Image (spheres, rainbow, N blue to C red):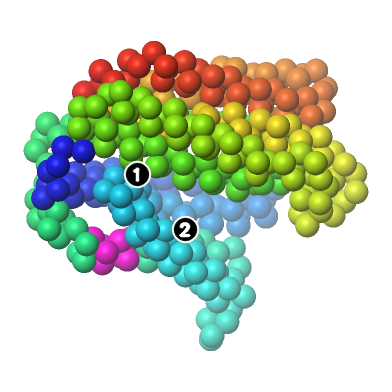
């Protein structure tokens, strides 16, 4: 937003350096610890054996994942999100092809099963990184790509912004593991239904994620121009569009949840168990869009610390305790669990809306 296009890729260089510095040692340590950590999540020896190998293969790709996030942020920030989309398509096509070949042993390759799935997914992530570098050389050379590094002050600011965001993502993923563990304590059918419901929800919120990325870019550019009023308005405008869009997209799940669930759940009892919770998810999807857009808008404004504090606080001190209370402790069913789960998500959206309205994010120095 400051018009310094010739330097716009220099922070990207710094992000790639930080990704390498943090991901390589973390990946090595976690790969070595995986055989110790995975059994804490699962008791079945067969699942532990296969799951550990898969996890190790995925952990090898931590470097590529970190670099891909850096590139994604850059392309969206400079209004070239089509390059991000193009890379996603390359990665997904590669992932599908490699998984098919390596899992089932096609084209002369040995059938590796779960290990093949891990290798294929990790390899496709590195393919995406390589393609990002090609695109960077082609489209960002004039912006300083691979021709300089930020100064120490800028690198420090990048760390200050990225560490809270990374912690928030880590605790979110860990919280989902705890959530599924709690649901599993209620029953096997409940766990199976919850797995389908969460996966459907993750697919359903993808348009909201796209709106969130757009909000982060627009807010960041407006603040770069020094136009705080425009930044505030962009946050609200994108939120309104996202909420309306997601609300419309949720209507089929609200009206005919059984049709959406039938391809994934074949047991009649489990299907009936999942219909009510899916309606709850659909009814609150517009609020989910509000939270997602404003979370990303706050990240675009550089206020990653408040995002971390609020997200972790609500998930770990409100949502998960309530899930435990209504589920394993009180003996409530899946609909009670999802009522408090989605209720906490609505509350999170309300907190982010309040923070955005107060405007303290506009005073964060980036």
Write the start and end of the magenta stretch as one range: 129-136
Report the Cα–Cα distance between label 1 and label 2: 14 Å
| Vertical side of 278 occupied by 31: above or below | below
The residue under label 1 is: 26
Say if residue 174 shows up in the picture. no
**Residue plotted at (11% across, 50% down):** 6
Q: Quadrant of the N terminus?
A: top left
* Sequence-earlier tag: 1 or 2: 1
Relative placement, left or right, of 1 versus 266 is left
Q: Helix, strand, or loop for circle 1?
A: helix
**Residue plotted at (83% across, 22% down):** 331
Q: Helix, strand, or loop for circle 2?
A: helix
Secondary structure of the magenta portion, mostly? helix
Q: Residue furthest right?
A: 268
Residue 106 magenta? no
Residue 133 magenta? yes
Where in the figure is residue 161, as x and y percent of width and height? 28, 31
Dividing the picture into quarters, in which one does residue 279 lie?
A: top right
Mark 1 and mark 2 in contact? Answer it, CB < 8 Å.
no
Dividing the picture into quarters, in which one does residue 182 lie?
A: top right
Q: Quadrant of the C terminus?
A: top left
The residue under label 2 is: 57
**Residue plotted at (59% across, 63% down):** 114
């Amino acid at each position: 937003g400051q018009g310094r296009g010739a330097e716009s890729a220099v922070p990207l260089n710094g992000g790639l350096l930080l990704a390498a510095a943090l991901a390589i040692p973390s990946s090595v340590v976690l790969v070595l610890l995986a055989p110790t950590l995975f059994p804490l999540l699962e008791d079945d020896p067969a699942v532990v054996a296969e799951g550990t190998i898969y996890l190790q293969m995925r952990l090898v790709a931590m470097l590529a994942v970190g670099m891909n996030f850096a590139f994604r942020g850059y392309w969206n920030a400079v209004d070239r999100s089509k390059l991000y989309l193009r890379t996603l398509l390359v990665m997904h096509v590669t992932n599908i092809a490699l998984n098919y070949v390596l899992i089932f042993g096609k084209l002369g390759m040995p059938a590796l099963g779960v290990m093949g799935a891990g290798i294929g997914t990790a390899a496709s992530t590195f393919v995406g990184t390589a393609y990002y570098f090609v695109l960077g050389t082609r489209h960002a050379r004039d912006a300083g790509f691979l021709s300089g590094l930020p100064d120490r002050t800028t690198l420090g600011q990048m760390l200050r912004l990225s560490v809270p965001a990374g912690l928030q993502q880590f605790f979110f993923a860990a919280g989902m593991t705890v959530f599924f563990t709690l649901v599993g304590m209620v029953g096997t059918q409940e766990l199976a239904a919850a797995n389908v419901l969460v996966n459907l929800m993750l697919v359903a919120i993808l348009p909201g994620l796209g709106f969130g990325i757009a909000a982060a870019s627009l807010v960041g550019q407006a603040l770069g121009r020094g136009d705080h009023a425009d930044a505030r308005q962009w946050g609200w405008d994108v939120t309104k569009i996202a909420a309306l869009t997601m609300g419309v997209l949720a209507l089929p799940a609200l009206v005919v949840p059984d049709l959406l669930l039938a391809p994934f759940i074949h047991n009649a009892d489990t299907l009936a168990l999942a219909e009510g919770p899916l309606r709850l998810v659909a009814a609150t999807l517009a609020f989910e869009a509000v939270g997602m857009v404003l979370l990303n808008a706050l990240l675009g404004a550089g206020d990653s610390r408040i995002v971390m504090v609020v997200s972790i606080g609500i998930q770990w001190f409100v949502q998960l305790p309530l899930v435990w209370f209504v589920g394993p402790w009180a003996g409530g069913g899946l609909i009670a669990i999802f009522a408090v789960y989605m209720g906490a998500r609505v509350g999170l959206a309300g907190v982010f809306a309040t923070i955005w309205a107060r405007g303290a994010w506009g005073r964060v120095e980036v």
